[in-house]
Image (tube, rainbow, N blue to C red):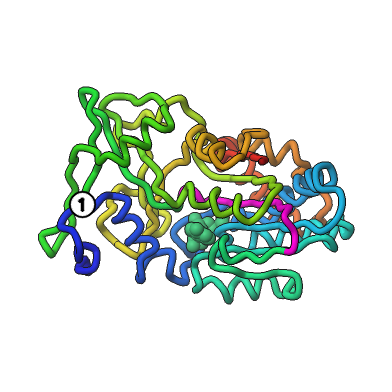
Amino acid sequence: MFKTLFAEKDVISFSDFVRYALYGPNGYYKKNFTIGPEGDFYTSPSVSKLFGKTIGYFFSKIILEKFPKDKISIVEIGSNNGELIKNVLDFFVGYHLDIHERLEVFVVEANLSAKNKIINNLASYKDQITIVPSISKIKSRTKESIILCNELFDALPFDRCVSRNNKFFQTNIFTDKKNIFERQDKADKNLIKFMKRFNLKIRENFFFEIPSFEYEQIFKDLSEKFDKMFFLISDYGDKSDYFNLSSDPFGTARCFYNHQVSRNFYKNIFNQDITHDVNFSLLTKIAFNYGFNEVDFVSQNRFLLDNNILDIYENFDSLEKIELTQQLKKLVLPNFLGEKFKFLSLRN
Ligand SMILES: C[S@@+](CC[C@H](N)C(=O)[O-])C[C@H]1O[C@@H](n2cnc3c(N)ncnc32)[C@H](O)[C@@H]1O
């Protein structure tokens, strides 16, 4: 199973392992996996259509204010089954046909196994959408774009590091051909360069995560495609002056398998998600290098309440509201998804 992983090197970085386990030929994100109750984890779009509709409301304000004329692209990156962008488009059809008619829609999903789900979910928009496997494949007729992603950055490969006596170490992986083991080695020069470049503080003896090149690639690819962008990023995590986001000495790296959280990275390989919290301070600094500036940073709870989720909910009939009430609570209440998830808005 690990033959290809160690084909070129006896010892590999944690990020190479995550890339292999999630995005390699048999990777978790190459499979036709399910998000929601039958899968390994929930995401807000899988909890309720209220989530996408509220983002639709937010975007309608942004589009009318910042992109008032002409055609505009809307791009969702890492859409998986397309549920989120469908609910955003449904909002425009219900309340802003004027905006809907100006839209060119791109659904960017690296997982080709998700394509049929996207086609099914977006059947009523089939003449308006283009599904592409990467940002670089977008062929837009406009240089202006609204971009969104939910739980994209937490799903990208990352390294795990720790500082001990002011020396940096990284987690590396090796095998005895049967099992995988990890060890801490002196951090390589690229990781040290990255830490110096983004210059956040580091808490001694506490592990932290360093995102790999895929993070920057997203901003680089977008800035090569569009001249004027508004980018809404929703994910779990927080801002911090430190690389360390957590008070847990182990850091935030974890796995999801059948809705169970663990740190068994080397079990259920290809069949479990590996993830970490997004450091939004770091993300903002990275985005800045590609011309993006922060517009706003709020909790999911604040974002949804400020953008009319309660009115959107009220507009459903009483039968539908029975189901939506529980979903609304899950999205908004601080002890469910409301505080752990954040919304970062960027503009170039
Ligand atoms: C955690 S899932 C989130 C799915 C969906 N956004 C949601 O909230 O339910 C992350 C998704 O991002 C996709 N992905 C990862 N890297 C990508 C990239 N560079 N371009 C497009 N999609 C990507 C994965 O294939 C996966 O479907």
Rendered-image quadrant of the C terminus: top right
For badge 1, the amino acid type reads Ile
Specify the quadrant of the image occupied by residue 206. Answer: top left
Cβ of mark 1 under 8 A from ligand 1: no
Dot 1: within a 10 Å radius of its alpha carbon, few (fewer than 14), some, or many (20 or more) residues?
A: many
Farthest residue to the left: give it.
Answer: 176
Specify the quadrant of the image occupied by residue 300. Answer: top right
Residue segment shown in magenta: 141-154
Residue 123 inside the magenta-drawn segment:
no
Residue sitting at x 44%, y 59%: 40
Q: Report the front residue among 230 and 98.
A: 230
- Is residue 311 visible in this depiction of the protein? no
Q: Is residue 268 left or right of residue 314?
A: left
Rendered-image quadrant of the N terminus: bottom left
Q: Is residue 298 above or below residue 323?
A: above
Q: Is residue 231 left or right of residue 341?
A: right
Q: Which residue is mark 1?
A: 173
Q: Is residue 115 left or right of residue 60?
A: left
